Amino acid sequence: MGTKRGAEQKYDNLATAVAEHDGNLVRFHPRFLAFAREYNFYPRACHLAAGWEKGKVERGGVGYVRQNFWPLRQFTDLTDSNRQVRQWLQQVANPRLHRETRQRPLDRFRPDALRPLPALAPDYRDSVEALVYKDFRVHFDGNRYCAPPLLIGQLLIVKADAEWVTLYHQDREVARYSRSWRRGQTFGAERFEKELLAQRAAAQRSHAQQRLIALLAGACAAETVQAYLRGLADSGRSLARQITGLLDLFRYYRPEAIAAALPESARRPSLRCRLCGQPPASAAVAARSPATPPAQRPGTQSTGHRSAVTLGLRRLDSPLPKGIP
């Protein structure tokens, strides 16, 4: 395809080309004028209600298509309609013998009168700025298109043509959708909602792990806690649930007692508890005074808190005893 060099092209005041027409004064859309300059033709807008200025296009061209192509046809989408009209042109319209010229349109077409299109076609897609709302959706042409949740509150560039709607952030494509000519549709919600849920779960797990390391910072090294967390992850159980239960033990025991019990539990996987958020059996008494160690006999070593925590960790694979809330 191409355009005739320096040719004058007539337009019937279509809204995408003519912005305003008042008598002999015509104001074209700036983007349309840029398109005309790029393809080297002169646009001319026909006068209103002046059918004779259009030659035989209105009756011979538009009327022929309306009467011979459109009736009794069904289309699934715009791509399907374009495919059918190209097939109709090749098989019916262009090979026919024209009633007035007595020639086939296929024979009268002169490709040598056209110049080739630019190697790199300019970007003349519809382009607007759109805000990403809290539900990570942008509004365009009566529909809602979802963007990555990280871009909430940002302005995106939405570019659309007859087939695609593309979202850009700082010259980077972030999402692309098939163009829909319906209204009130939402696209991409399922995809980005799953990503948002995954990010929230990861953030919660990360926050819980950082809190656990901070609570044990003065009692043991961070590497020890991280090694214990890796052991919990390799156990096949829910890591988030186990960390939550482990944090719950701080309500009953000192950080030193929990830190002292971690190495033994890490060495023996069978000692890891289910950590379902309830205190171990011996914690019922310790819960009355979490910061006060149990009474000691003279000359004995204090191991009450450590043994109680170890007991709690041992209950990883055993149910809680009856009577424990």
Image: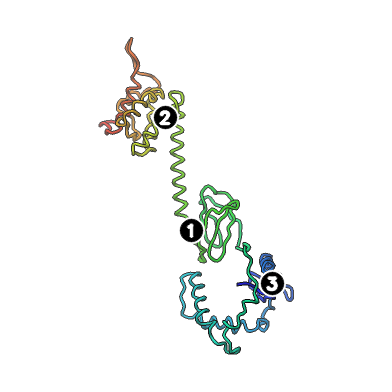
Q: Quadrant of the C terminus?
A: top left
Q: In the rendered view, would you say 172 is above or below 227? A: below
Q: Nearer the viewer, mark 3 or mark 1?
A: 3
Q: Quadrant of residue 127?
A: bottom right
Residue 107 at x, y = what percent?
58, 83
Query: Label 3 is placed on what type of residue?
Result: Phe
Q: In the rendered view, would you say 282 is above or below 2? A: above
Q: Nearer the viewer, mark 3 or mark 2?
A: 3
Q: Quadrant of residue 167?
A: bottom right
Q: Viewed as shown, does residue 297 lie left or right of 78?
A: left
Residue closest to the eye, 124 or 313 = 124
Q: Secondary structure at mark 1?
A: strand
Lower sequence index among marks 3 and 2? 3
Q: Secondary structure at mark 3?
A: loop
Q: CA distance from mark 3 to mark 2?
A: 73 Å
Q: Secondary structure at mark 2?
A: helix
Residue closest to the eye, 54 or 47 = 54
So how many labels did they put on this image?
Answer: 3
Lower sequence index among marks 2 and 1? 1
Q: Which residue is mark 2?
A: 225
Q: Which residue is mark 3?
A: 41
Labelled pair 2, 1 in contact (Cβ < 8 Å): no
Query: Label 1 is placed on what type of residue?
Result: Phe
Q: CA distance from mark 3 to mark 1?
A: 39 Å
Labelled pair 3, 1 in contact (Cβ < 8 Å): no
Q: Which residue is mark 1?
A: 187
Residue 210 at x, y = what percent?
46, 33
Residue at the limit of the structure toward the right, as seen here: 24
